[in-house]
Image (spheres, rainbow, N blue to C red):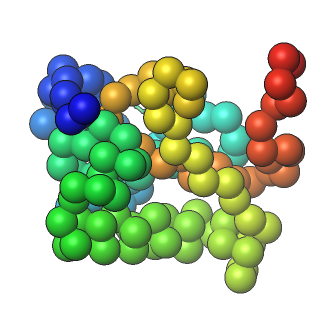
Amino acid sequence: MPYTYDDQNIFAKILRGEIPNTTVLETDHSLAFRDIEPQAPEHVLVIPKGAYVTYDHFANTASDAEILDFTRAVGKVCDMLGVAPSDGEGYRMISNAGENGVQDVPHLHVHVLGGRNMGRMVAKAGS
Ligand code: AMP
C-alpha cells in the first residue's frame, strides 16, 4: 500500500519554518537539527526535505540525488559531532518506523546519538 504523508507533522512544520529548530547542518535535500529531548550528550536528527514517512519509503522512492545528499549529510553530521570512531568514540544511528518501530513523528528521520556508551541495541523481549 502506498504511503500517505501527513504534512501537519512536526518535522514538516520545521521544514516550512513554522516552528524553530537548532540546525546543525542544512544541505540541498536534507536538514540536521538537535533533538528537543536529547537522550545522549549528542543527539541529532537528520531528515530529508522531501515528504517521506520512513526509511524504506525514502530508500524505495527518493531520487538518487536525494539519497546521495541524505547519506552524505549523515556522514558529515557524524564528523561535525566528533563521534565517528575514526576520531571519536562512536555513535548509534536509529530510524524508527511505524507501530512496532515506535515512530512518533511520521517524517523520516535518523537519530544520531553519541557522547556516551549507548548500551545494547534493543531491550530483550518482554522487558
Ligand atoms: P521517533 O520516536 O523516532 O519518531 O522520534 C521523534 C523524535 O523527535 C523524539 O526524539 C523527539 O524528542 C523529537 N522531537 C519532537 N519534536 C521535536 C522538535 N520540535 N524539535 C526537535 N526534536 C523534536
Q: Locate the N terminus and report the quarter of the image it occupies.
A: top left
Instruction: Say left or right for 52 vs 95.
Output: left
Q: Is residue 76 visible?
A: yes
> Which image quarter: residue 87?
bottom right
Against 3, residue 89 (above or below) is below
Question: Exactly how many numbered labels are in the figure?
Answer: 0
Instruction: Say left or right for 1 vs 88.
Output: left
Closest to the observer: 93 or 40? 93
Residue 74 picture location, percent across and down? 46, 64
Residue 66 picture location, percent across and down? 23, 65
Residue under the image location 29 percent in, 56 percent down: 60
Q: Is residue 20 visible?
A: no
Q: Locate the C terminus and report the quarter of the image it occupies.
A: top right
Instruction: Say left or right for 115 vs 17.
Output: right
Q: In this view, which residue lies farthest toward the top? A: 126
Instruction: Say left or right for 55 vs 125.
Output: left
Closest to the observer: 5 or 76? 5
Residue under the image location 38 percent in, 49 percent down: 56
Residue under the image location 31 percent in, 46 percent down: 57
Residue under the image location 67 percent in, 66 percent down: 83
